Amino acid sequence: MRVMIVSLSPLWKEPPRLARALAEHGATVASLAIAGSLLDYSRFIARRYRLGDDSPTQNNELVAAISAFAPDVLLPGDECSVRWLHAVYREAAVDASVKALIAESLGDPQWYGRTTDKLAMSRLAHELGIAQLETTALGCTEDAYAFVQRHGWPVVIKACRGFAGIGVHPCANLRELRQTLHHIRAPSPQLIQRFVPGTTWMTAFVAHRGEVLGALVAEKQRQHPALIGPSTIVRFAHDPAMLEVTHTLVHRLGYSGFGSVDFLRTQGRDPLFIEFNPRATPICHLGGKLGVDLARAFVHRRACDSAGMRNERVALFPQELQRDRSGAGLVGCWHDIPEDEPELIAAMLAA
């Protein structure tokens, strides 16, 4: 399989880790990335293509790279790349062969633009009867006050198209809510959601044409920033209920590629859906060491048994060291550091 990783966000940490995992299963991996991307430091990239900073030229650079490398699949390495490929598909001037490649890579085009919208995915979860946190659109300040009256404190306000903790504002009282409403950017669509005490979990999966080929389940034991930021320490543990929801969403979306689903687990209740992420997350490359190899499933389009996952506690590199440079949090964890890639280690620590 010939895989082209597309990356508009140069400092995202998963693309170079996933490049290695894919190459180790026989894939020929190319990168199409902004200058300074962490992908530049991976020794598992067979061909490198450059994206300029000028948006009007990027479509042409994508088409040229596809023509030169002839990939079987495109793999967006970050949220911005997912949105860009969705937009490219919608452009009338784009060649049909490029659109076909995007559809083969990302799944059913009717959902493009909605998989990156938290409110749209919340509405889909409701339609499918999936238990979730109470969520509604935030059109004006009165919507926020009415939501609090119905559901109480605390709440969280989120940008509908935010990611990696960006645009997430927990509010424990009226003063914090007013401050948040004052500072958020009005043109950006927002939602308001009930904020319930509990533990945050995620499934990380790979799928093809609406079929989950394999999935990992992990508890986010530490995040940076706390509560709202990306994971730094995760604990893997099998959870059939979360896997069932993941299968239901992926099937409905006709989804292809890597992705993840976030959940909240509260005492005595089934997991509650939080959000859907249509991209690889920082645990996707770990499957080979956990007994559920997502990279192998992706390359060979062959399902693996998610129930066979080994329970492990993993400190993500460099995320946990960026949270606590003393390294105290590494105790009792397997530290996922690419020890035989010193250039990548240095670049990730400097990012």
Image (tube, rainbow, N blue to C red):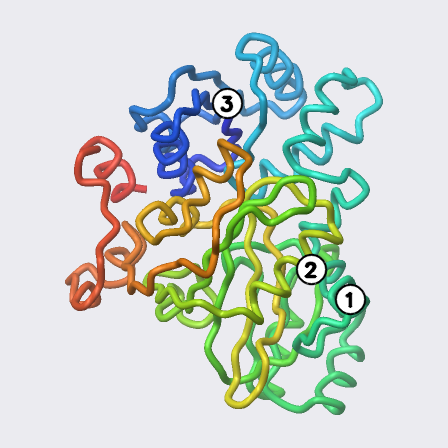
Toward which corner of the image does residue 315 lie, by quadrant?
bottom left
Where disc 3 sits, the SS reads: loop
Residue depicted at 77% across the width and 38% down the height? 109
Residue located beneath label 1 in the image = 128
Q: Position of residue 185 (x, y in %)?
A: 67, 59
**In this rendering, is residue 33 above or below 221?**
above
Q: Pointers 1 and 2 in contact (CB under 8 A)?
A: yes
**In this rendering, is residue 150 above or below 258?**
below
Q: Along the polypeptide, which appears first: circle 3 or circle 2?
A: 3
Q: Position of residue 323 (x, y in %)?
A: 29, 61
In 3D space, how far apart are the residues under numbered discs 3 and 1 (Cα atoms)? 34 Å
In 3D space, how far apart are the residues under numbered discs 3 and 2 (Cα atoms)? 27 Å
Q: Is residue 253 left or right of residue 50?
A: right
Q: Pointers 3 and 2 in contact (CB under 8 A)?
A: no
- Badge 2 amino acid: Thr
Residue depicted at 70% across the width and 54% down the height? 117
- Badge 1 amino acid: Leu
Where disc 2 sits, the SS reads: helix
Residue depicted at 66% across the width and 77% down the height? 133
Q: Position of residue 260 (x, y in %)?
A: 55, 54
- Badge 3 amino acid: Met
Q: Along the polypeptide, which appears first: circle 3 or circle 1?
A: 3
Q: Residues within 10 Å of mark 3 (few under 14, many from 20)?
A: some
Where disc 1 sits, the SS reads: loop
Residue located beneath label 3 in the image = 1
Q: Position of residue 347 (x, y in %)?
A: 27, 36
